[in-house]
Image: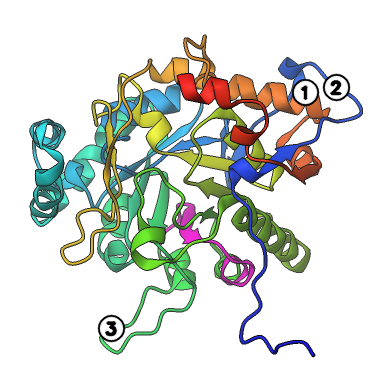
Amino acid sequence: MATPQFKQLRRSYGFDEVAIVPGDVTINPDQTNIDFKVENFTFSIPILAAAMDAVTDVNLAALMSKLGGLAVLNLDGIQTRYDNPQEILSEIAQASDAEVTPLLQKVYSQPIKENLIGERIQSIKKAGAVCAISVVPANTKRFAPIAAEAQADIIVVQSTVTSARHISKSYRGLIFSELRESISMPIIVGNCVSYNACLELMRTGISGVLVGVGPGAACTTREVLGVGVPQITATIDCAAARDAYQQESGRYVPIITDGGIGKGGDLCKAFASGADAVMLGSILAKAKEAPGVGLNWGMAHPHPALPRGTRVKVGTTGTLEQILFGPTSVTDGSQNLVGALRAAMGICGVRNIQEMHKAEMVVAPAITTEGKSWQLSQS
């Protein structure tokens, strides 16, 4: 007699557990179209730089836009708390491992200066760049009008986990349909990992969804809270919600896989799983232009009571352009990410991102067990 089960678990998959199957036809990589669209904005590469203080500042946002992508500036971070953020970034970089968490909690306890919000946005706009900014849900009603007045182009409402419905006794939560009516700029919301949460968010009228809870290199949510879903499964589930919502409404809302992408192979698998774009953190923190000078830390690291992040040393390996477009000087797949995507699409015989969604995938042995141990032991 079968033993009754209290809870049925399904298998989920991360990047290292799957592989993309080559297509029956191949095409030249330079004939692939990798454009990414958010409402009226079209980006020539489907890559966003994360709203992390060690990744995106005004200078990197301008450069990322020039290179065809989009960088998101964190309005709840160092850039809007300090007139001279470079001094604070240097202090964080020089702190020991034992000192860094209390230091970050102190640094992020300083109040946000609303005048700096407009100044940072205007600096990005003056550089001729598309300006995307990130806010946490609790600050969205306060900061969104300021960002709109400063002529930001895209707003990202982002927290560890975001849902369309939030229950609280203390305040009336952020309602995305009302936010949609109050500001004209596209609204990207994250993060989520499930079909139902993604579908409900799309039904509020938002412009894009960030997918990912727990996989980031500087994130410890899985360890601290036990919460998260591996990125392949999370992306597949949210892609299903996107397609269901398109059938229901006629409106296509892109999903952006955010977190855990450390090399070109991960990035390509994200698109094969259904992503329309990816958001990158630690891999872009390796750029010479990144403000973290070879370090990165999770944005939940400075939480005053329950830090959910860690400062990681990623090193500085090349320019932002080299990481995105090559030529690569490393063999670990962390440079020429755009070239890797185009090459994978060519091997799969697909001409655009939506065709890449249909590429066959298989569950595969982890690369450490399939003949690559010598490579990994020498890296």
Label 3 secondary element: loop
Of labels 1 and 3, earlier in sequence is 3
| Magenta-drawn stretch contains 193 | yes
Image height check: is 252 above or below 6? above
Label 3 sits on residue: 171
Of residues 338 and 113, the one nearer the viewer is 338
Label 1 secondary element: helix
Identity, as a three-letter code, of the amino acid under mark 2: Thr
Of labels 2 and 1, earlier in sequence is 2
Of residues 232 and 2, the one nearer the viewer is 2
Q: Nearer the viewer, mark 2 or mark 3?
A: 2
Q: Is residue 218 left or right of residue 197?
A: left
Tell me the distance, in whole angstroms, between the alpha carbons under discs 2 and 1.
Answer: 5 Å
**Marks 1 and 3: CB-CB under 8 Å?**
no
Q: Is residue 285 left or right of residue 104?
A: right
**Residue 221 visible in the picture:** yes
Image height check: is 309 above or below 72? below
Residue at 33% from the left image edge and 30% from the top image edge: 314
Label 2 sits on residue: 26
| Magenta-drawn stretch contains 306 | no
**Marks 2 and 1: CB-CB under 8 Å?**
yes
Q: Position of residue 4 (x, y in %)?
A: 69, 89
Q: Position of residue 325 (x, y in %)?
A: 53, 17
Q: Is residue 265 left or right of residue 360?
A: left
Of labels 2 and 3, earlier in sequence is 2
The residue segment tinted magenta is: 183-200
Q: In which quarter of the view is residue 246 placed?
A: bottom right
Q: Residues within 10 Å of mark 1 (few under 14, many from 20)?
A: many
Label 1 sits on residue: 346
Q: Quadrant of the C terminus?
A: top left
Identity, as a three-letter code, of the amino acid under mark 1: Gly
